């Protein structure tokens, strides 16, 4: 018998959205977990998530429905009914419309801090989850039968044992580093500037993607808690340009953004505080080690411009929970190598497709050559004229393939 203060079937390190969603999904399958989050509890998650908005794609909506949380999330979301993709300064445009694609909506937009708070409240209600916060993993040992963890929890140090440890500890993942799992980092020398934007026109449930030589710009429709129309704005550009634009007055920022984007969404009038995120891609070819697996940003990170990071992660959570449910039903050890391997094999293609999709978005539109520009424009025209191709693209971005 281990001399540990806390035992759980699964120990999840990192109480971000991925750690919380995984703990809830495991609880649904009667698997208990201890969830460790290093940051102190926050009332409204404004510090962690600033004014970021997230697109919930159709596959993720199914995930939240299966988890029984969609009825709580949906009232805080804004449906996307129409997506308009255009090519700055050139011909070519693609429009995706819910009616043409015969779907009830193309996706939903939610404030990241609202989604985080709803998950946090659900975790607190769930008896199968032991949520320790602030609780920082200090060290761990992988033994034959358990992973033993030592955790700083307030003023005390707690020890615990679990059959499986999940590293949901974010893009820098100390667990990934400690396990020396090979990590491929692709830097784009690009930074995403993020803020909310008020325009002279109401959003009318339209999202916009503008492809420029500096990188893509995205406007996401969003109705805030007071019922006011906004757009979530993500603008990617070279890092030195982003640094300059972070420092200028709001008026200058608005003028420059309008110049790049045009007037399809109306006149840009007001912005919220601006945040910036360096853009890179992280690929971890082998995401498991003895009794340990990486999830979410610890396992894969993509450009925020594609709105895919959390959407990809929840598909992985659904797969891992299912593997663990089956293992438990068959009386198998949850940390067994075959269980972790089965999860990773099942996730490989989905992860690679999502990494490729976002990489194409970041690189293809960066090339400023006359021939490439013409091909790009013709490509957009061709997509717009081909419903089957549009459906395929929608299914890829929607996580439905
Ligand atoms: C601007 C922007 C826009 C985005 N838009 C979208 C979108 O539209 N759609 C979408 O699907 N995704 C989007 N994403 C991506 C999405 O936000 C991330 O994929 C997701 O938040 C990753 O969550 P995570 O839990 O893996 O990581 P994090 O949120 O980084 O959580 C990791 C947690 O682990 C904790 N931790 C670390 N080390 C330890 C330790 N030793 N002990 C205990 N705790 C520890 C940290 O404190 C942290 O809370 C966007 C991202 C950005 C930046």
Image (cartoon, rainbow, N blue to C red):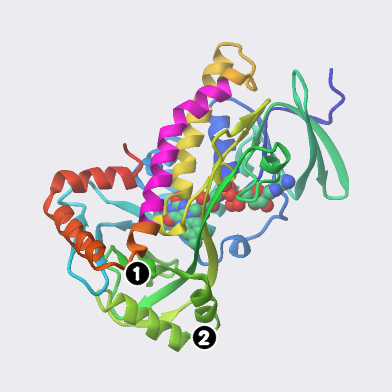
Label of residue 248 in the image: 2
Local crowd size for mark 1, using a 10 Å CA cut-off: few (<14), some (14–19), many (≥20): some
**Badges 2 and 1: C-beta atoms under 8 Å apart?**
no
Question: Residue 312: percent from the left, percent from the top?
Answer: 45, 43
Q: Secondary structure at mark 2?
A: loop
Near-viewer residue (138 or 373): 373
Is residue 170 within the magenta segment? Answer: no
| Disc 1 target residue | 213
- Exactly how many numbered labels are in the figure? 2
Q: Secondary structure at mark 1?
A: loop
Residue bounds of the magenta highlight: 339-361
Question: Residue 354: percent from the left, percent from the top?
Answer: 40, 44
Residue drawn at the location 44% of the way across and 41% of the way down: 64
Report if residue 374 is visible in the image.
Answer: yes
Q: Earlier in the sequence, mark 2 or mark 1?
A: 1
Residue 23 figure quarter: top right
Main SS of residues in magenta? helix
Residue drawn at the location 31% of the way across and 66% of the way down: 211
Question: Residue 291: percent from the left, percent from the top?
Answer: 67, 26
Residue drawn at the location 54% of the way across and 69% of the way down: 276
Where 348 falls versus 399 (above or below)? Answer: above
């Amino acid at each position: 018998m281990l001399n540990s203060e806390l035992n759980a079937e699964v120990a999840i390190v990192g109480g971000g959205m991925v750690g919380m969603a995984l703990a809830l999904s495991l609880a649904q399958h009667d698997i208990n977990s201890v969830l460790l989050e290093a940051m102190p509890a926050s009332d409204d998650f404004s510090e962690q998530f600033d004014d970021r908005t997230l697109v919930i794609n159709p596959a993720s909506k199914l995930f939240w429905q299966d988890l029984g949380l969609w009825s709580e999330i949906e009232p805080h979301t804004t449906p996307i009914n129409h997506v308009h993709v255009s090519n700055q300064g050139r011909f070519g445009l693609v429009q995706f419309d819910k009616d043409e694609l015969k779907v009830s909506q193309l996706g939903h937009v939610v404030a990241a801090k609202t989604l985080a708070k709803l998950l946090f409240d659900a975790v607190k209600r769930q008896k199968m989850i032991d949520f320790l916060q602030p609780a920082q993993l200090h060290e761990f040992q992988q033994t034959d039968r358990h992973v033993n963890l030592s955790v700083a929890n307030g003023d005390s140090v707690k020890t615990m044992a679990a059959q499986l440890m999940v590293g949901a500890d974010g893009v820098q993942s100390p667990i990934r580093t400690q396990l020396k799992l090979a990590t491929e980092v692709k830097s784009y020398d690009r930074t995403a500037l993020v803020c909310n934007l008020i325009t002279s026109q109401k959003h009318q449930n339209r999202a916009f993607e503008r492809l420029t030589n500096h990188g893509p710009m995205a406007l996401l429709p969003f109705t805030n808690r007071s019922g006011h129309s906004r757009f979530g704005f993500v603008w990617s550009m070279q890092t030195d340009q982003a640094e300059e634009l972070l420092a200028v007055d709001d008026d200058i920022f608005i003028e420059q953004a309008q110049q790049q984007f045009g007037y399809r969404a109306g006149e840009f009038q007001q912005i919220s505080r601006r945040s910036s995120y360096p853009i890179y891609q992280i690929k971890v070819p082998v995401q498991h080690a003895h009794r340990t697996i990486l999830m979410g940003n610890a396992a894969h990170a993509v450009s925020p411009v594609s709105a895919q990071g959390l959407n990809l992660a929840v598909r992985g959570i659904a797969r891992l929970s299912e593997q663990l449910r089956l293992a438990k039903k068959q009386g198998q050890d949850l940390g067994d190598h075959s269980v972790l391997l089965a999860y990773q094999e099942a996730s490989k293609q989905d992860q690679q497709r999502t990494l490729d999709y976002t990489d194409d978005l970041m690189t293809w539109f960066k090339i400023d050559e006359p021939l490439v520009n013409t091909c790009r424009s013709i490509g957009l025209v061709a997509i717009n004229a081909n419903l089957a191709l549009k459906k395929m693209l929608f299914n890829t971005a929607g996580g439905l393939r």
